[in-house]
Image (cartoon, grey):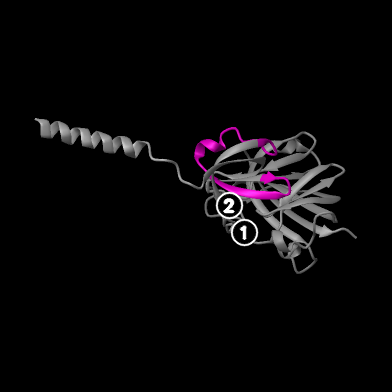
């Protein structure tokens, strides 16, 4: 009987040790401005002054995230990673109706490591993709021209070819120097003034259309953007 009790005591002690193991040495708390996040990869990007850090975090750290708010995130520092260039919804979709086109000029205020550029314009801020953050055609402080084309997407009929994932020839980077991107994503926010916030793998982007009445949160849109040095 004593030997059985001794064995049980040993097992309980071992179990207690397993449940009280210290956390990983590289786990930490990181505070900064919420810049982007991607729940699929578990990465939250924070801005700390002029620097950006990527934190690998648990799912509970994504609750209540608010773009550009200050937040403390618990997790592990993550290095740079390859980021996909196009978000294609799981259901085959096709563009529908006439696209909304808007051109604005402004000044580049930041280019973050995940591949997004922020531009302040008279109408408001614009945040879109760049191909290579470290070798962008435009730099912080430059005056630029931003061209935006937004078009709603609807479910494609049976047998219809899915939307192409490449740039159209008219928007080819070889035709005019600039930063070109195509994003297909869900509308996160629609402002009546025409400001649209669109989901993307690099975090939300912000573009403008003449009026927001045509769009609804939760719907999918295709966004073509290009950023060029202002002449």
Q: Examine the rendered structure and indicate whether residue 172 appears above or below residue 151.
A: below
Q: Nearer the viewer, residue 78 or 174?
A: 78
Q: The C terminus appears in which quarter of the rendering?
A: bottom right
Can you give x and y, in whole percent of width and height, for residue 184 in the image?
A: 64, 50
Q: Which mark is residue 88?
A: 2
The residue identified by callout 1 is 165
Can you give x and y, in whole percent of width and height, for residue 180 in the image?
A: 73, 59
Q: Nearer the viewer, residue 197 or 51?
A: 51
Q: The N terminus appears in which quarter of the rendering?
A: top left
143 sits to left or right of 154: right
**Magenta stretch contains residue 50:** yes
**Magenta stretch contains residue 51:** yes
Residue visible at 42% across and 40% down in the picture: 22
Observer able to see residue 184: yes
Q: Nearer the viewer, residue 218 or 80?
A: 80
**Disc 1 on helix, strand or loop?**
loop
**Which stretch appears magenta?**
47-70
Can you give x and y, in whole percent of width and height, for residue 101 in the image?
A: 79, 49
Of labels 1 and 2, earlier in sequence is 2
Residue visible at 71% across and 61% down in the picture: 134
**Pointers 1 and 2 in contact (C-beta within 8 Å):** yes
């Amino acid at each position: 009987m004593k030997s059985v009790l001794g064995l049980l005591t040993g097992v309980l002690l071992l179990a207690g040790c397993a449940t009280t193991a210290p956390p990983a040495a590289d786990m930490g708390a990181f505070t900064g401005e919420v810049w982007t996040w991607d729940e699929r990869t578990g990465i939250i990007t924070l801005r700390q002054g002029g620097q950006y850090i990527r934190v690998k975090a648990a799912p509970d750290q994504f609750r209540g995230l608010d773009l550009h708010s200050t937040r403390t995130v618990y997790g592990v520092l993550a290095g740079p990673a390859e980021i996909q260039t196009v978000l294609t919804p799981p259901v085959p979709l096709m563009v529908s109706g006439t696209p909304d086109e808007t051109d604005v000029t402004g000044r580049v205020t930041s280019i973050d490591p995940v591949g997004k550029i922020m531009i302040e314009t008279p109408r408001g801020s614009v945040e879109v993709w760049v191909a290579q953050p470290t070798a962008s055609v435009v730099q912080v402080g430059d005056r630029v021209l931003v061209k935006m084309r937004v078009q709603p997407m609807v479910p494609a009929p049976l047998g219809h070819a899915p939307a192409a994932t490449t740039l159209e020839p008219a928007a080819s980077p070889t035709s005019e120097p600039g930063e070109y991107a195509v994003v297909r994503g869900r509308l996160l926010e629609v402002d009546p003034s025409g400001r649209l916030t669109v989901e993307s793998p690099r975090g939300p982007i912000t573009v403008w259309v003449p009026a927001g009445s045509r769009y609804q949160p939760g719907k999918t849109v295709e966004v073509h953007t290009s950023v060029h040095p202002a002449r």
